[in-house]
Image (cartoon, rainbow, N blue to C red):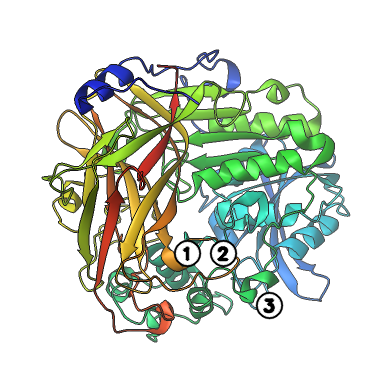
Amino acid sequence: MIKFRRRSRLSLVVAATLAGITAGHAQVTGLTGPFAGDKPLPRPKGPYALVRLGTARVAMRDGTELSTDIYLPDRPGPQPVILIRTPYDKRAFSPERSIQGSVAAFVEHGYAVAVQDVRGKFASDGVFTPNLNDDVDSYDTMSWIVKQPWSDGKIGTYGCSALGEAQVIAARLRHPAWKAAIPMAATGASGGAGGRNLPSADWNGGAFELASSVGWFASYGRKVPQRIDGKPDYKGEVWQVLKRLPVITALDDPVFPASDYRNFVSHPPGDPFWSKFPYLKQGDQVAVPALFIDSWYDYAPAVAFSQLAYFQQHSGTFGPTHRIVIDPSTHCDQHFEGNPTVIGDRTVGDARFDFWGLYFAWFDHWLRGTDTGVDRMPLVQYYNMGENRWRQATSWPVPGSHDISFYLASRVGAQSRKGDGALQLQRRLKAHIDRFTYDPANPVQSIGGPLCCVPTKDDKSPAGAFDQTPVEDRRDVLVYSTPPLTHAVNVTGPIRAELYVSSDAPDTDFTAKLVDLDAGGHAWNVVEGITRMRWRGGYARQMPPLVRGMVYKVTIDLQATSNSFLAGHRMRLEIASSSFPRFDRNLNTGGNNADQSTPRIAHNAVHIAARYPSRVILPVVGRP
């Protein structure tokens, strides 16, 4: 435990202590070799021509046939096969409509590629339910592939989001021909494994990921096979229905196709409904080397590290083979080519990375036996924002990091950025209560953050880093800041807030957002989390209703990041009770939030005192 000498004045304590915390960490050097981010390459052209073999109807064990396109390199003999399973139309991977050129890239590099519409989607038979059959359907497809004359019996898998989740879900069945996986942004498949209970990608801290879920189900989640070209334009409708109460009715309009949205929003975490899904469960064993890819502005980067750790601990001799790369982008947006890299409105330097070189090296090593060096690759490669450089580490949390508590303090009140809310290192706190009113009819607006799949009329992504100043002007947002930093502070690792709170409502939410306030006054959102108070004890069971006047300790998971707060910047924490429309609004009634439409106002408070040491816990790299 790192301890700090106490001083009588807050500014002296923070400035003197933070001045000694460096932005670097021990025994870490710049990347070199094929995995370096300093000389990124476009998708490389390979020596082989692409040949489309045709479309196969692959029968699953229950007789359902899944449509699968086969692409081969123009070279003799059977080849290793890359399997891509998608709910987003396999035709999008064709050379004519290729997503990021992935099929052409692998085929030109000498691999056979099988692209499959998952059950109930586009040209495949059956009824679609997200993730429900991804384990057995993946296994049965692999069993079919190894019997084909163009297959040499070795399979790799690749894909992002639902395509990555299908890989994590299938890993528990351990197909013997499966030799390598690249699951990207696959954290929605974690289930209860690894100690971070995530029933699906739609729930976070007991709150429903409203914007991303409504956007996804409206655009991609239809139950019946999608046998039409293109998809309807739902851009205007989606943003309007996000405001609708009760939230269970958001997609009831005939313009939206039938989907599982109602089921997903109406079954909270811990409901037996989730047990039928093949998400990774504690105790599941896996047996495939996995290269995890994720992003700091995706919705659950800390869960990606949890998946990595779980695979390390539950794959026997494969434990040392797994790796992870975390870039600064938003959901499935790794292949950025611009310099400088802009995430939302925030410029983070040149974050380009030779992802394609890494993919080829990964598959060449595990599928062809080529010594590409991936077995000597660092366990973790990640991008540090602020410092704006790629880094590597031998473990997670990274070597040299220490959890340091920054305690909330105020004297007059922390309501809005105009208040006197402070973050301080000393625990000697003057007793104070910061009160605010949460009205679900006037929630705090989400500005950026880890949103996915929400269409906009101008096709500009609403995800990423944006100036939070409009949010901080509200009196229902508590704002706590350090003084300007005298030296850079490197925050790299998992982040959490521990608050002592009270409310006059039987249930309510508390949100926490870490912000980088730069010297120009831009308040960039870094990470954000939420806890619905009925789930403050975890998902095993709902906690009893809140009692007026009683103080409760609540932990808010802010996921993870790597962000250097530069000299002259301030570290800032925002506390509120809503972040809408990212999360559904807690109506404060204590009832079933999904099917209620009449909210009540909650009078909430954060308590500060020696006995109530509300704080944010940051993993700071370097010693003071």
| Front: mark 1 or 3 | 1
Residue that badge 3 annotates: 126
Q: Residue at x 69, y 35 (%)?
A: 322
Number of the front mark, 2 or 3? 2
Q: Position of residue 363 (x, y in %)?
A: 71, 35
Q: Is residue 598 left or right of residue 169?
A: left
Q: Which residue is mark 2?
A: 539
Q: Compared with residue 458, is residue 414 higher up or lower down, i.e. above or below? A: above
Q: Nearer the viewer, residue 526 or 294?
A: 526
Of the two numbered discs 2 and 3 on the same chain, state the one appearing first in sequence. 3
Q: Residues within 10 Å of mark 1 (few under 14, many from 20)?
A: many
Say what secondary structure mark 2 lies in: loop
Q: Residue at x 55, y 34 (%)?
A: 325
Q: To which quarter of the image does residue 143 belong?
A: bottom right
Quadrant containing the C terminus in the rendered view: top left
Q: Gap in Å between the C-alphas at discs 2 and 1?
A: 8 Å
Amino acid at the residue labelled 2: Tyr
Q: Is residue 188 left or right of residue 155?
A: left
Residue at 26% x, 53% y is 447
The x and y percentages for residue 477 are 21, 54
User: Where does the image place residue 279, in percent across and percent down from the top left?
Assistant: 67, 61
